[in-house]
Structure formats: C-alpha cells, structure tokens
Image (cartoon, rainbow, N blue to C red):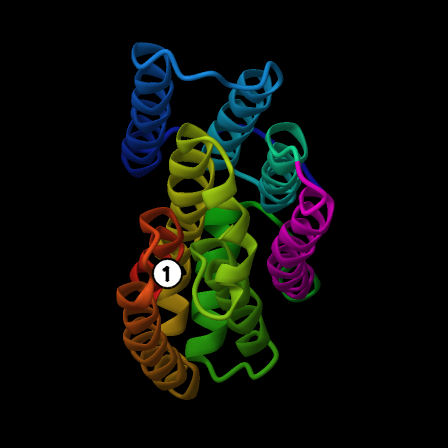
Amino acid sequence: AGAMGLEVSTLSLYVILAIDWAAFLALFATVARDVETRRLSGPVTLLALGVANGALLADHFLARYAALEIVALCIALIPLIEMKSPRAVPLAWSCYLLLRLGDAGLLAAILILHAAGGMLRIAPVLEFAQGAIEGGSAVLGWTVVGFALAAWVKLGGWPFHLWSRAGPSLSLASHAWLYAILVPGLGGYLLYYLTPLLALTSPLRTAALWLGAGSAVLTALFALAQRDHRAALVYVGATQAG
C-alpha cells in the first residue's frame, strides 16, 4: 500500500477547526444546561472526533478509509449507548450498514485507482485519475461513481438519509454534532475532492445535478410536513445534502 502519513493543508485545517468547534459548542451546551448524558457518550464522541481529524489529515486513501470505518462504528454505537428502547439495536444496525454501503463505494473507487495507477497517495492518484478521465478512460469513470456514492451516503442525501433517523432519539449534542455535522462534514470534504472528476464525466454530472435538485425539493417538503422539530432536522440535513 505504500507509506502512510498526515498532510496539513489550509482546507483540512479549516474543516478541522469548524468540526472541532462545533463539537466543543455541542458539549459545552450540554454541560451549561446540566443535561444528563450517558456515561459512554463522551468517550465515543471524543474517539469519533480524533479519528475524523485523522481522516481529514490522511495523505493516503487506505488510511482515510480505515478512519472512516471507525467513525461509522462510533455513529452506530451511540444509539446502543443512549437509547433505552428495543428500537436501539435495529436502528444501530441499519445506520451502520448504510454507512458501510457508502464505504463500499469508496473502497471500490480506491481499488480501481490502485489497479490503474499503482498508488494510493491521495493527491497524486487523483491527479492521475483526472488526466486519465480527460483522456477518455471509461474504467476510471467508475471511480467517480464510487466516490459519488460514498459522498452521497455520508452527506445523508435521500434516500440514504435513513442512517440519520436515529438522531432525534438521542441527546441533542449527539444528534447535532455526530449526525448533523461530523459525518456530513466528512462527506462534504470528500465531495470537494470528487468535484474535479465529476466535472469531466458529463452523464454523471447531469445525473448528479438532477438527483441532487430533485431530492432537495422532495426532502424540503418532507421537512415542512414534520410536526416534531428534531425529526424535521433529519430532512433538513437531507435537503442540504441535495
């Protein structure tokens, strides 16, 4: 797989700053309001925070993939920790499996890139992929499909917003930061790197435009129809993803 390391860029630092401050504000609001939380929620949140920062700084696709797997595990564990209901187990499993579906798309894209370019360092392999797609490579077009699926799932776009349906049953801090900020933030970061490749693949670009716009309108209507504000936030997130 080659050497793995961390690479600091202005963009990654901005994203880390935003995500970390959001985590601080969510936890501070919990303490300030004296809201009771489950004992293990804090450690899982901090684990997700540290691993997500590692994913944002990783210069190697395999390292980033492994970090995202741990984040998905943390997201699935929170319902088991905080919910005192029989619904916790099926919600945790559905959440985890949907996030794994996105990671399967990411892994497929990584393997295609490795087979074509023989490397997994993020910056050079994406530069290679861009040149190959410009040259008409149909195989690397599937890389864009895998990345797009991974970004779509993490952003919580319809119909993959279902992974975030456990959020309203959790504490407000866990719902706001883990479900509405952290994972969609990682999806947005992935989308940033995908965009130059997506711009070169006309059919996929058009499909993404229409799917994004259509799902945004649909989930906005669903959000307006919700009476519970916490439940509406799930659809608001899906609208933003679109």
- Residue type of the residue flagged with mark 1: Tyr
Q: Horizontal placement of 17 versus 175: left or right? A: left
Can you see residue 7? no
Task: From this view, report whether residue 201 is shown above or below residue 121.
Answer: below
Which residue is more in the foreground, 228 or 174? 228
Magenta region includes residue 97: yes
Q: Horizontal placement of 141 versus 218: left or right? A: right
Residue beneath label 1, please? 235
Task: From this view, report whether residue 167 is shown above or below residue 10.
Answer: below
Provide residue 185's location: percent of width, then percent of height.
Answer: 38, 44
Which residue is more in the foreground, 159 or 139? 159
Image: magenta residue range:
85-112
Residue depicted at 62% across the width and 63% down the height: 105
Q: Horizontal placement of 30 versus 107: left or right? A: left
- Quadrant where the C terminus lies? bottom left
Quadrant in the rendering for residue 62: top right
Quadrant in the rendering for residue 19: top left
